[in-house]
Amino acid sequence: MRYRRILPLSLFAIACDSPVAPLACDEPLPIYAIREHPMEYGICFDASSREALTYTAKSSDREVVTADISGGKLVVTGQSEGQARVTVVARGANGATGAVDYRVVARNAWNGGVTKCVLTPADEGTDYEIEYWLRANIDLVDVATRVTVGGVELGPIPSRDMTSGLEVRSYRRGRMAATPTSDACSVDIDYEIAG
């Protein structure tokens, strides 16, 4: 009699799970970068396995805006007025990556200029007229305006807050005893960014 030996046949299914790329939570809205002032924005990626993500950021034009990651946030700093694209790449522990592009509008915290500058010699001094404007491009607090006429800084102007979009026009005239060192006028401000 013949005996037949039946060997169990084991089937092994080896599954190769390909890493799932982190996905951005939402389509990002345009963001702003203010010249010489780092601004932070939250980054939102969904890690499918809840593993920790690491991020990198790269600007398409570093002469307009620089970008970095700090404490899990995107930090952008305007270098000059203009627009650039910042790409944030998220990398999971499994090696999978996802990317999102942010359109960044870089601008100055404020714009302004002198529209009229007249210096006229007078008895015992110089008569002056200056007209200027300032516009806040972001909320500014403790704005202290410095006006210089003929190389001489005029008296202090009280500090004020300026909300984004606020434009101020000012006209000043008077007489200064100091002798002008030039025929130019200028306006500048010291400020802090709100928040």
Image (tube, grey):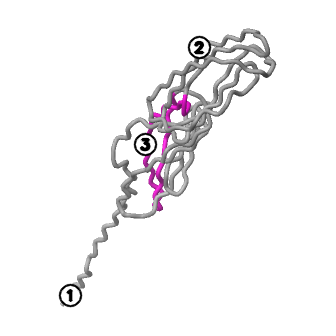
Residue found at x 28% / y 71% = 11
Residue type indicated by callout 1: Arg
Q: Which residue is disc 3 drawn over?
A: 100
Looking at the image, the residue that sits furthest to the bottom is 1
The answer to which of 44 and 96 lies nearer the viewer is 44
Residue found at x 44% / y 37% = 31
Asked if the residue at tag 1 contacts the one at tag 2, i.e. Cβ–Cβ closer than 8 Å, the answer is no
Which stretch is magenta? Answer: 83-110
The quadrant in which the N terminus is found is bottom left
Q: Which residue is disc 1 drawn over?
A: 2
Secondary structure at numbered mark 2: strand
Residue type indicated by callout 3: Val
Does any portion of residue 159 appear in the rendered image? Answer: yes
Secondary structure at numbered mark 3: strand
Residue found at x 40% / y 57% = 19
What is the x, y in percent for residue 32?
47, 36
The answer to which of 61 and 75 lies nearer the viewer is 75
Residue 96 covered by magenta stretch = yes
How far separated are the C-alphas under marks 2 and 1? 113 Å
Residue 115's tag is: 2
The answer to which of 10 and 125 lies nearer the viewer is 125
Residue 88 covered by magenta stretch = yes
Secondary structure at numbered mark 1: loop
Q: Is residue 15 left or right of residue 159?
A: left
Residue found at x 48% / y 57% = 95
Please tell me which of labels 3 and 2 falls first in the chain: 3
Of tags 1 and 3, the one toward the viewer is 3
What is the x, y in percent for residue 113?
59, 20
